[in-house]
Image (cartoon, helix red, strand yellow):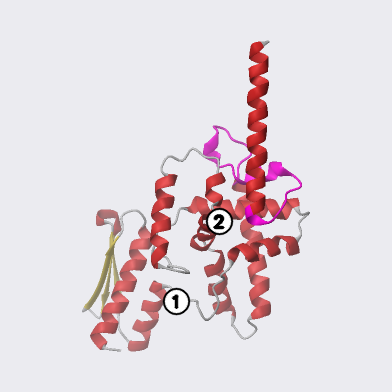
Amino acid sequence: MAEETEKLHVEDKEQEENTNWVKSIQEITGYEFHDPSLLQQAFTHPSYDEGCSSSLDRLAYLGDSVLNLLITQEHYALYQDLDPGKLTRLRASNVDTEKLARVAVKYGLHKFLRHNLLLLAVQIDEFKEAIKDYPLHSNGLIDTPKVLADIFESFFGAIYIDSNCSMDTTWKIAKNLLEPMITPATLITHPVTQLQEMCQKKGLPMKIVDLWKETGEFEYVIAEKFIGRAKYTAKRNVAKNKAALNAYYEIIQELDF
């Protein structure tokens, strides 16, 4: 009898914690779920429980597609003079991993994630520290924990389903959380693209030396003279982007323009 009473007490406590957890997320995001189980799924990482069959993965897949369409519609209507290439770059900057991770951290959504990822807390702290140097976006110069973006995408996949697939409802919440949006005026060219365009403009041959597997480094040799180098062992693309930015500034300094 005592065991049954204790079990009921534990279940009641868990139910109360779940209710408070749901209310907290709804207060932060401004959306009240009709089906709280969707919200629970949206914040459950596959690592949380072995053989977990109700994790955020499928909702993140859906949310990614929905967010891309919503941003596409918004930009198509707002920026009627932009060509498809610029619209694509603008959309990417507003829904890529870093942008969505920033939003998740800004509103503390990561605190509600149920997971068993041992290094996640450290990775998030490093990410929060790194973004201080880049108010809007780093353009690939920092290492972003992908799970942060997954949280945001799965959350909006859940809203989309819970709102009976209402694009208007989903966009109302998403637009509010995504502010400040990156606009054509604040969009920064990616470091690799920036370097390539500079070399093409000045007729400078460019060679990439990929040493990442051996040393964690990338080198850009420009006209056999200018060298941009960077080392980042944790992620290949970050090292490559940092090296490209370094090479770009080397050219700027050498050619004095």
The residue lying furthest to the top in this view is: 1
Q: Which residues are magenta?
A: 28-56
In this view, the residue in front, 51 or 97, is 97
Q: Is residue 47 magenta?
A: yes
Residue 208 visible in this rendered orientation of the protein: yes
Residue shown at the point (54%, 32%) measured from the top left:
50
Q: Which residue is mark 2?
A: 107
Task: Say which mark, if any, is on residue 189.
Answer: 1
Which of discs 2 and 1 lies nearer the camera? The answer is: 2
In this view, the residue in front, 121 or 239, is 121
Compare marks 2 and 1 and give the one earlier in the sequence: 2
Point out residue 206 in the picture as x, y percentages from the top left corner: 30, 77
The quadrant in which the C terminus is found is bottom left
User: Cβ–Cβ below 8 Å for labels 2 and 1?
Assistant: no
Q: Is residue 103 magenta?
A: no
Q: Label 1's element?
A: loop
Residue shown at the point (74%, 44%) measured from the top left:
35
The amino acid at mark 1 is Thr
Q: Label 2's element?
A: loop
Residue shown at the point (73%, 49%) measured from the top left:
33
CA gap, disc 2 to disc 1?
Answer: 27 Å
